[in-house]
Amino acid sequence: MDIKRSEEEIYEEAKKRVDEKKGFFTHLIIYIIVNVFLIIIWAVTNPGGYPWFIWPIIGWGIGLVIHALTVFVFNRKTGWEQRELEKEVQKLKREQK
């Protein structure tokens, strides 16, 4: 059962993907800005001391990597998901009649 998607559905899917990418890049920019400020604070208040700023960089960095993976790698529908989506579309069309 291969359902052709309308132009509107394709557009909505593309818009969703662009919004997800935009969200990731916003996250990345905020990550960079905040962590640069943390490094500056460390350098001004305790230069040469324990580099405590690495812990938020590592912790938040793990979250950022997970965000990147969900947006760029694992964002594709699986075969099962596509089949279930098609079933639901057919079900909704039948209910609509």
Image: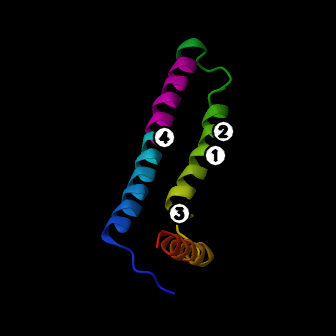
Mark 2 or 4, nearer chain start? 4
Residue 27 shows which numbered tag? Answer: 4
Asked whether the residues under the numbered discs 1 and 3 touch, taking CB atoms below 8 Å apart as contact, a structural biologist would say no
Q: Quick check: is 26 in the magenta stretch?
A: no
Residue 59 shows which numbered tag? Answer: 2
Disc 1 from disc 3: Cα separation: 18 Å
Q: Nearer the viewer, residue 9 or 56?
A: 9
Task: Name the residue carrying label 1.
Answer: 62
Position of residue 27 measured from the top left corner of the image (x, y, whole percent): 48, 40
Q: Residues within 10 Å of mark 2 (few under 14, many from 20)?
A: few
Mark 1 or 4, nearer chain start? 4
Give the mark toward the camera: 2 or 4: 4
Amino acid at circle 1 = Ile
Position of residue 93 measured from the top left corner of the image (x, y, whole percent): 48, 73
Amino acid at circle 3 = Asn
The residue drawn where x is 60% and y is 36% is: 57
Disc 3 from disc 4: Cα separation: 17 Å
Region in magenta? 27-43
